[in-house]
């Protein structure tokens, strides 16, 4: 096996392969990282019902309904993240022995990578971002909190005894991430799994590369170079200045995946349907209550849809009907889309609602509030409206003890002016009423545009929302539904 292959798989040098074979009796072959060695500690975690549950959670949630290649699960992502976490911390230990990275540090960081997604619910972020806020308004719950709960349950239920209470607390904090100094812990270790400084972490390395690979989207950055060209300066992981464009490409790839894949219109429409089905089923199946009960949460996976389908309770008929519609692609429909000027986001968020759109019906329209769904999609490079590269620190090969910031003008002149966008999207639960709803919504938008105050000395207004002519639905739209074969 040549050096290039080893670097691509993440090994820091040729000796690492030998070490891996000597120290690990089990390997799994992964399409992203090649052969991944699994230590005995990792196997004790993996071979449990709590971790095996991740096989039934799609990594990409409802995007799988649109991108058939996106069938991979949280299970392999967590193993890949653990592998990269181990590679980063062991590489730093070898290159910088003065950091005094201990075997305990390596074990805890690796296990944090392995366990960081234990708490995801059905269809991943759909559960914690969309379902829980509507099922339990005001509830402060996230999948990271779920991961901590499930880690405790895994340890107790399987009599895991190689971790003490201090180790468990450390692993939980590594999963949660922090920029607050922790007593007796090395702060740079918190940059590895969940980096709250700048988002450059092994979780992102793995999921971006894995998702790109599985859906067939090209990825133009190389995470193995980032790992090899990193070092700790002043308790922070920094990168060789020559990797500045590589990091820029990583953040751009993340944005591109959110733009083209994760927030796909059809995937979002199916997400609305699944959330509606779960909300209908919640009073009967008590789905939302499982977030505080690890034994019940352990059985809560994407298979929830099959559980609803198999049910016979009359109260779940409406949920069963929604799932049946997904199967035959009779989904909620996209109506219209607007990219919002930054200065109008808050005004539009409060003004464009289903109730407001209903208020602009024409005399012959028959749609009601329940027919209309409004969503504001937020897409960014990883740090909201800020350039994430501004939060990364670099070093020069001529001075590896000093860290510094690199301005975007020193990376490329072809970089964005803005790093975040908000997209207003309107959907309908009733496909036959798409045209009515779009025309009413555009009348509302037109009124909002006329009410936008002009900046001094300017005309037209400083900002306005422009409809996309290509999305205009004809008064009598053609039937674009694919014809079925008549046998």
Image: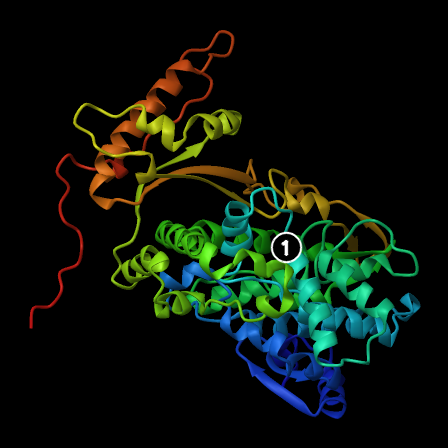
Q: Is residue 366 visible?
A: yes
Q: Residue at x 45, y 66 (%)?
A: 304
Q: Quadrant of the C terminus?
A: bottom left
Q: How is the image coloured?
A: rainbow
Establish if 46 lies above or below 370: below
393 sits to left or right of 253: right
Establish if 380 lies above or below 328: above
Give the labeled residue for mark 1: 247
Q: Position of residue 80 (x, y in %)?
A: 62, 73
Q: Is residue 226 visible?
A: no
As drawn, the residue found furthest toward the front would be 314
* Secondary structure state at the residue bearing disc 1: helix
Determine the image quadrant of residue 324.
Answer: bottom left
As drawn, the residue found furthest toward the left would be 487
Q: Position of residue 209 (x, y in %)?
A: 54, 65
Q: Position of residue 442 (x, y in %)?
A: 30, 27
102 sits to left or right of 348: right
Q: Position of residue 66 (x, y in %)?
A: 36, 60
Total labels: the figure holds: 1
Q: Residue at x 66, y 63 (%)?
A: 147
Q: Residue at x 33, y 59 (%)?
A: 314
Task: Please name whichever residue, 345 or 322, is drawn nearer the observer in this view of the structure.
Answer: 322
Determine the image quadrant of residue 461.
Answer: top left
Task: Please name whichever residue, 99 or 181, is drawn nearer the observer in this view of the structure.
Answer: 181
Instruction: Categorize mark 1 by other alpha carbons within 10 Å: few (<14), some (14-19), many (20+).
Output: many
Q: Quadrant of the N terminus?
A: bottom right
């Amino acid at each position: 096996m040549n050096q290039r292959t080893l670097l691509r798989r993440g090994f820091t040098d040729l000796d690492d392969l030998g070490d891996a074979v000597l120290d690990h009796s089990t390997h799994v072959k992964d399409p992203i990282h090649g052969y991944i060695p699994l230590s005995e500690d990792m196997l004790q975690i993996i071979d449990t019902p709590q971790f095996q549950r991740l096989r039934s959670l799609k990594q990409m949630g409802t995007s799988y309904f649109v991108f058939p290649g996106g069938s991979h699960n949280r299970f392999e992502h967590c193993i890949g993240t653990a592998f990269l976490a181990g590679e980063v911390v062991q590489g730093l230990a070898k290159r910088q022995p003065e950091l005094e990275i201990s075997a305990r540090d390596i074990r805890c960081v690796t296990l944090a990578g392995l366990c960081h997604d234990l708490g995801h619910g059905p269809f991943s972020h759909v559960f914690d971002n969309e379902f829980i806020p509507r099922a339990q308004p005001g509830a402060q719950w996230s999948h990271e909190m779920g991961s901590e709960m499930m880690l405790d349950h895994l340890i107790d239920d399987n009599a895991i005894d190689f971790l003490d209470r201090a180790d468990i607390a450390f692993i939980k904090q590594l999963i949660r991430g922090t920029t607050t100094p922790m007593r007796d812990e090395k702060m740079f270790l918190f940059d590895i799994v969940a980096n709250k400084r700048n988002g450059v972490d092994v979780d992102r390395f793995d999921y971006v590369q894995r998702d790109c690979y599985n859906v067939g989207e090209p990825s133009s950055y190389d995470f193995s170079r980032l790992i090899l060209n990193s070092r700790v300066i002043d308790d922070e992981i920094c990168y060789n200045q020559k990797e500045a464009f590589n990091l820029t490409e990583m953040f751009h790839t993340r944005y591109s995946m959110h733009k083209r894949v994760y927030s796909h219109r059809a995937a979002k429409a199916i997400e609305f349907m699944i959330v509606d089905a779960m909300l209908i089923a919640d009073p009967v199946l008590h789905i939302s209550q499982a977030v505080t009960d690890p034994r019940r949460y352990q059985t809560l996976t994407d298979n929830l849809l099959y559980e609803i389908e198999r049910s016979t309770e009359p109260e779940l008929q409406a949920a069963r009907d929604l799932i049946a519609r997904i199967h035959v692609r009779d989904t909620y429909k996209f109506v219209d889309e607007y990219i919002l000027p930054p200065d109008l986001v808050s005004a539009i968020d409060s003004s464009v609602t289903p109730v407001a759109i209903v208020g602009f019906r024409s005399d012959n329209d028959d749609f009601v509030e329940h027919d209309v769904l409004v969503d504001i999609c937020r897409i960014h490079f990883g740090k909201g409206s800020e350039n994430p590269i501004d939060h990364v620190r670099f070093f020069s090969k001529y001075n590896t003890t000093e860290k510094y910031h690199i301005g975007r003008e020193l990376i490329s002149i072809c970089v964005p002016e803005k790093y975040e966008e908000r997209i207003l999207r309107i959907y309908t639960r009733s496909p036959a009423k798409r045209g009515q709803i779009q025309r009413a919504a555009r009348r509302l938008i037109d009124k909002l545009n006329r009410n936008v105050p002009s900046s001094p000395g300017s005309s037209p207004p400083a900002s306005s929302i422009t409809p996309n002519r290509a999305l205009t639905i004809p008064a009598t739209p053609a039937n674009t539904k694919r014809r079925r074969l008549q046998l």
